[in-house]
Amino acid sequence: MNIDGFPSRLLENAVTEFAKLPGIGKKTALRLVLHLLKQNSEEVEQFGNSVIRLKQEIKHCQICNNISDDEICRICSDDRRDSSLVCVVENVKDIMAIESTRQYTGVYHVLGGIISPMDGIGPGDLNIEPLEQKLAGNRVKEIIFALSTTMEGDTTNFYLFRKFSRFDVRISAIARGVSIGDELEYTDEVTLGNSIMNRVPYEKTISSR
């Protein structure tokens, strides 16, 4: 199917913008745009406004860097959560994956990425300093490394372990029920939940390699 011969510049522009989204090719983008054209104006306006409001009004939690509607996210403001237990994750999708297990009762810290020299991402590009400040304040008893089990994830774990080992805090990692090379968001809830509940001291994960 050749979709280069657009009958409308407006249609072409809309398809081009949709095709910029990850995993969306031009054919899929065209189907989405044509679907929107079939909707009434109120529904399309609601769709557009939700995206605009998302960009303009979304915040990042001042405590954990999670995405939030408010200055402090729902998890950090929940007094039922154990703030002395901090799970270190790469991004917001990992929080959503872990929360879906309903087995974790602590809080989180979002790094905003992992160390990846190939992509030009070093420790200075990550949200590490706020976590270090928490540890220095002796408010944290345990941190759990829950990064993807890839080479980049393991490199980041090791860097953080070396950096934080001077603090009086337990450092653990999710159990290897999550297969090597897996991203947390694609791990089923039962496996991920078990990996968190059966976490092990990080030193053991080093010696087992």
Image: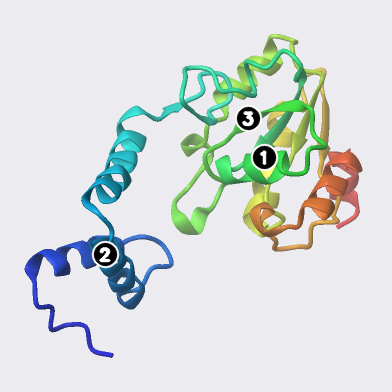
| Residue under the point 77% across and 52% down | 189
Q: Amino acid at mark 3?
A: His
Give the colour scheme of this rendering. Answer: rainbow
Q: Secondary structure at mark 3?
A: strand
Nearest to the eye among marks 2 and 1: give it.
Answer: 2
The number of callouts visible is 3
Q: Is residue 14 above or below residue 190?
A: below
- Answer with left or right where residue 52 lies relative to residue 60: left
Q: Is residue 114 visible?
A: yes
What residue did someone put label 2 on? 38
Q: Is residue 84 above or below residue 184?
A: above
The numbered mark, 2 or 1, whose residue comes first in the sequence reads: 2
The numbered mark, 3 or 2, whose residue comes first in the sequence reads: 2
Q: Secondary structure at mark 2?
A: helix
| Residue under the point 23% across and 63% down | 37
Q: Quick one: 138 or 25, which is closer to the camera?
A: 25
Q: Secondary structure at mark 1?
A: helix
Mark 1 Cα shell of 10 Å, populated few (<14), some (14-19), many (≥20) = few
Nearest to the eye among marks 3 and 2: give it.
Answer: 2
Q: Amino acid at mark 2?
A: Lys
- Answer with left or right where residue 104 lies relative to residue 130: right
